[in-house]
Amino acid sequence: MGDAMRLRVHIWMEDHGETAMGMGRALLLAKIREHGSLRQAAAEMRMSYRAAWGKLKATEARLGTALVRKAKGQRFELTEEGERICDAFLTLHREVESFASARAQNLLGIAVTCTASEEPSAPITAVPLK
């Protein structure tokens, strides 16, 4: 087998069967934080501005809180709650991947790695959920 096999993990949160938060939405928030631009974040994620806006608004509605706000000019910034949710979900995903990788390696007896398909450029720190 050579190199370690790669374990893929996909987690998301749903509200009445509709996606509330997942890795794509967390990465969208991280890219908005990085660029200060929804348009640039969407382009970098290879989605239309309209699709990114729709996902963002749907997530805000399902979570019951604003995640971004207009900043100076055409810029966007994450709200305090947007920062917290983005960081907390990315931390959760990394922790689940780490556990899944170690558990798979233990159960299967083969070298297994597990990494997200994309890494946000903003540093991730554990943030307690309210």
Image (cartoon, helix red, strand yellow):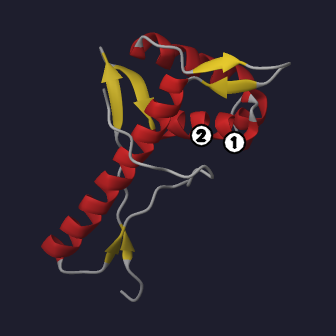
Circle 1/circle 2 CB separation < 8 Å: yes
- Classify residue 9 as left or right of residue 58: left
Q: CA distance from mark 1 to mark 2?
A: 6 Å
Q: Residues within 10 Å of mark 2 (few under 14, many from 20)?
A: many
Q: Position of residue 129 (x, y in %)?
A: 32, 32
Q: Position of residue 114 (x, y in %)?
A: 38, 64
Q: Position of residue 42 (x, y in %)?
A: 70, 33
Q: Is residue 26 visible?
A: yes
Tag shown at residue 100: none
Which one is in front, 34 or 127?
Answer: 127
Position of 67 relative to 61 (above/below): below
Residue that sits furthest to the left in the current view: 107
Q: Position of residue 4 (x, y in %)?
A: 38, 80
Give the residue displayed 37% in from the left and 57% down from the top. 8
Residue 1's image quarter?
bottom left
Q: Quadrant of the C terminus?
A: top left
Q: Amino acid at mark 2?
A: Ala
Q: Residues within 10 Å of mark 1 (few under 14, many from 20)?
A: some
Q: Dot 1: what SS?
A: helix
Q: Amino acid at mark 1?
A: Glu
Position of 19 relative to 29 (above/below): above
- Classify residue 36 as left or right of residue 112: right
Q: Which residue is mark 2?
A: 30
Query: Number of callouts in the render?
Result: 2
Give the residue displayed 49% in from the left and 35% down from the top. 86
Residue 46's image quarter?
top right
Q: Which residue is mark 1?
A: 34
Q: Dot 2: what SS?
A: helix
Q: Is residue 10 visible?
A: no
